[in-house]
Image (cartoon, rainbow, N blue to C red):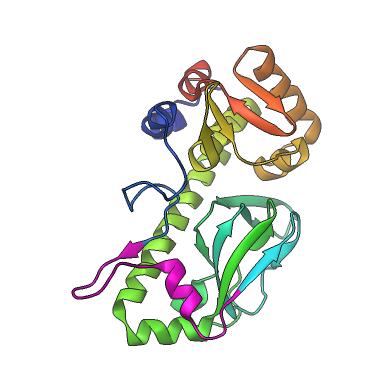
């Protein structure tokens, strides 16, 4: 099945990737992918969302091991989360028992903020699980709400963080629209290259240790199918797998191969 749609969406970011992008927020551009939203107000220094979260009453740094649940659907919406290290998978669980991934959050992503918009204390629509070992800064929703009421710039920072999360959700939904599992896997690998990719001499290495089972769960497949499809990509000279780390030699070529 052709994947012209995701090829168009990812083309620009993949070109940037092959030219040596970095997902870490050390570059001069504060708007780079993966950077913590920040803003400057007249007469003040630039403030980041991380600094705001850390300064709130009741904030804490939490570490969650891979595979552990952060919150379940329906849990009280008492805290807001800012991801500092690792990846978090957000999924929807339907009455049929099917669980669909709606976002794979990267470092510096904000989540768990719907309670601030809806005013409800139990509005957890998603299952949030540590896709890798993660470190998060968390703060009580009440503290975040008070900070917004006291300083409108805090609300703007939160909206910027939330908009990034929405874009990640849209990208994941686009990935899952592919009925053909080969196309779905390739689309997912391109998303991982963009959000978790580290450029090297051989290509873009996805900075996550991914088991075939984890990939299968993320895109609604089976471990056996993913093992076979990754084997095909490896035999075609498009990817390399070493100790659960996947390197895509040329993301543009990978996209074109299935376009």
Res 216 quadrant in image: top right
182 in the magenta segment: no
58 in the magenta segment: yes
* Vertical arrangement, residue 117 with respect to residue 256, above or below: below
Res 188 quadrant in image: top right
Q: What residue span does the magenta drawing correspond to? A: 38-60
Residue 26 at what x, y percent from top left?
41, 49
Q: Residue furthest top?
A: 236
Quarter of the picture holding the N terminus: top right
Q: Is residue 95 left or right of residue 31?
A: right
Q: Does residue 126 show up?
A: no
Q: Nearer the viewer, residue 71 or 86?
A: 86
Residue visible at 43% across and 63% down? 162
Residue visible at 38% across and 31% down? 16
* Vertical arrangement, residue 163 with respect to residue 147, above or below: above
Residue 249 at what x, y percent from top left?
55, 21
Residue 203 at what x, y percent from top left?
53, 24
Q: Is residue 96 left or right of residue 252?
A: right
């Amino acid at each position: 099945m052709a994947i012209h749609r995701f090829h168009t969406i990812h083309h620009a970011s993949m070109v940037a990737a092959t030219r040596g992008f970095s997902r870490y927020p050390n570059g001069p551009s504060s708007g780079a992918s993966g950077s913590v939203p920040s803003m400057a107000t007249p007469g003040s220094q630039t403030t980041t969302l991380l600094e705001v979260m850390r300064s709130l009453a009741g904030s804490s740094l939490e570490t969650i091991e891979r595979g552990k649940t952060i919150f379940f659907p329906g849990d009280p919406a008492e805290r807001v989360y800012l991801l500092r290290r690792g990846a978090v998978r957000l999924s929807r669980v339907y009455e049929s028992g099917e669980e669909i991934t709606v976002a794979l959050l990267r470092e510096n992503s904000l989540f768990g903020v719907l309670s601030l918009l809806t005013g409800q204390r139990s509005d957890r629509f998603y299952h949030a699980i540590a896709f890798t070992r993660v470190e998060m800064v968390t703060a009580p929703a009440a503290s975040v709400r008070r900070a917004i009421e006291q300083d409108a710039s805090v609300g703007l920072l939160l909206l910027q963080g939330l908009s990034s999360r929405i874009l990640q959700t849209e990208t994941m939904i686009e990935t899952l629209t592919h009925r053909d599992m080969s196309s779905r896997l390739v689309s997912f690998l391109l998303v991982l290259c963009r959000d978790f990719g580290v450029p090297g001499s051989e290509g873009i290495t996805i900075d996550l240790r991914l088991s075939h089972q984890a990939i299968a769960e993320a895109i609604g497949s089976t471990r056996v199918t993913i093992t076979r499809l990754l084997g095909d990509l490896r035999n075609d000279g498009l990817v390399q797998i070493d100790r659960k780390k996947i390197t895509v030699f040329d993301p543009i070529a990978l996209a074109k191969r299935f376009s």
